[in-house]
Image (cartoon, rainbow, N blue to C red):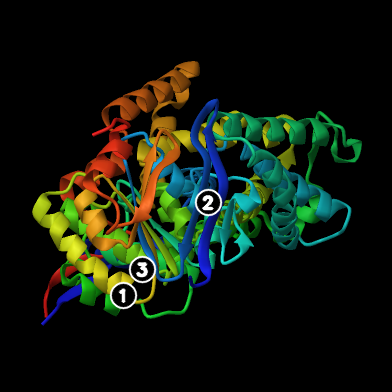
Amino acid sequence: MPEATLTLSNLDAHYGDFQALYGLDLELAAGEVVAVIGANGAGKTTLMRSISGLLRNRPDAVRYRGQPIGAMRADQVAALGIALVPEGRQLFPSLSVEENLMIGGKVGRAGPWDLGKVYELFPILEERKAQASTSLSGGQQQMVAIGRALMANPDLILFDEISLGLAPVVIRQIYQALPSIVGEGMTAMIVEQDIAQALAMSSRVFCLMEGRIALEGRTEDVTHDQITAAYFGVEA
Amino acid sequence: MSAVVTRSTPASRVAMVLGLVALVVLAAAPWWAGRADMRLMGEIYLYLSLACLWNLMAGYAGLVSVGQQAYVGFGGYMLFALTVFAGLNPVVAILAGGLLAAALSVPIATLIFRLKGAYFAIGTWVVAEVFRLSFAQIQALGGGSGSSLPVAVVKELGAKKAAREANAYWLALGAAVVVLASVYLFLRSRRGLALTAIRDSETAASGLGIDIWRTKLEVYVVTSAFTAIIGGLIFLQKLRISPDAAFSVNDWTAFVIFIVVIGGIGTLEGPIIGTLLFFALREVLADFGTIYLMVLGLVAIVVMLKAPKGVWGLIRERYDLELFPLSYRVKGKE
């Protein structure tokens, strides 16, 4: 197995008194694409927030290329090359499409992604680059959110619910673009409720239930029944 | 064939030309305006500057301070202290006061940035009160009753009264131009882009590598320095300082918030419109005593309820205008 890009060891996460994650252990190899699935409230977004520094933790709960990053701030984590495509997109409504993308490039990491390459991936964004980001359709906004994360030239990209609230045809369009992103040797973690899309993209799958890993395996090995059992917590 | 993307609009170009013409006319005021008018215009420029600075902090950086009087008063007191005790020229003393305020604002920021929202606002007010009580203890600066600027210092601004008044007027006008231009250029820069991103979504901004704490600190320090310089200019016009006048929450923060809120928070045009409205109301209602403050309060409440984006927000929505172009627009096909 190649060198681990991301290692989670005994990761807990709390919101006040409420515990959202219980002792998660997980390892991501360089260039690997994994899917994290689970029902609402299973802890998927909390996991993303913990990795990206939006939720602080013990330093060694999250390691990136061996370096403990669990206690780092989100901007420090981003500077190391971890980018998050957040749930709900979270574009900057006061800024134009291009300005949104430019903010993504602010960490100043070298790499293949720049404005030209993002526009090549999503040509519609070039046509709309001067528009306010919120005037775009949901799918186009998701493209901006993905493009913005790519502009940071990350080595590890975290997609949080990219298909949430989008029409099926738009979801297909976005998923069609993903192979050319992760094909760049990027390591990716895809959090999804749309299980079929997530499994089609990934080589391994983790299913979270109530803050714990209920199922873990290679995508081709896990059965439909296993997923159903892990997802709903009942025997199929 | 591609669309031309531009920041400027016909309205912004007209505004720039009219602004330059107005600047020339205003700069010539000592030759055409009376003493009282010049004093009033000087006051307008200084309030405009304070409003622009508070707007940058609250409207863009989300730092809603009700304690900016700390820096107004500090700048005023530095003018008196540095001219009287260090023998500095008043203009040099005012600029030095700005630098000292910047240095002082760093430890204060590390303290009050731990507080969020309403607690931050109260924290800034507490700091301002500490400043007021501290300066009231300094007997050399007149203690609680304050002191006047010595005649020798005042004369450094001009041997004759007319020259002094003209110089004070130009300093106020120059300060307003510098503040407006600095805020505008800052917001157009990459740092300004980051600041706007933080205002829109702190979570997304920090996830993209923007150091929120540092960006806010930079804004706080620069705003504090400029606010102290404006404070110095205010008390250069008044020629007398006391702790209650220097650190007045009413004069240097409440009125400034009123200006920004009725003009339109988070826009560059808002503070300009707000300042003009505030002074128009003040001049009209000057003879009504306390009713004046009640009317101001009423206007603020009505604007907040009916037009939360302020008067400029209403105008912009109605006519799609932007005098200080910060956003990009598609102009058409090439």
Q: Say whether mark 3 and mark 2 are on the same chain.
A: yes
Residue drawn at (76%, 45%) of the image: B77
Task: Say which of A64 and A26 sits in front.
Answer: A26
The disc label shown at residue A150, or none = 3
Task: Say which of A76 and A17 sits in front.
Answer: A17
Q: Say whether mark 2 and mark 1 are on the same chain.
A: yes
Label located before the other in sequence (2 or 3): 2
Q: Secondary structure at mark 1?
A: loop
Judge from the rendering whether residue A231 lies leftward or rightward of residue A77; answer left or right: left
Q: Which residue is mark 1?
A: A183
Q: Nearer the viewer, mark 1 or mark 2?
A: 1
User: Label 2 sits on what residue type?
Assistant: Gly
Q: Position of residue B265 (x, y in %)?
A: 39, 42
Note whether B282 is above or below A83 in the view shown.
above
User: Label 1 sits on what residue type?
Assistant: Gly
Q: Say whether mark 3 and mark 1 are on the same chain.
A: yes
Q: Which residue is mark 2?
A: A53
Task: Say which of A15 and B125 sits in front.
Answer: A15
Label located before the other in sequence (1 or 3): 3
Instruction: Name the chain letter of the residue that bears numbered label 1.
Output: A
Q: Secondary structure at mark 2?
A: loop
User: Label 3 sits on what residue type?
Assistant: Leu
Q: In this rendering, does residue B318 appear at all?
A: yes
Judge from the rendering whether residue B224 lies leftward or rightward of residue B43; answer left or right: right
Give the Cα separation between the discs numbered 2 and 3.
18 Å
Q: Position of residue B232 (x, y in %)?
A: 68, 50
> Could you say which quadrant of the image residue A46 lies in?
top left
Q: Secondary structure at mark 3?
A: helix
Quarter of the rendering occupied by the C terminus of chain B: bottom left
Give the Cα separation between the discs numbered 1 and 2.
25 Å
Q: Position of residue B207 (x, y in %)?
A: 46, 55
> Could you say which quadrant of the image residue A95 lies in?
bottom left
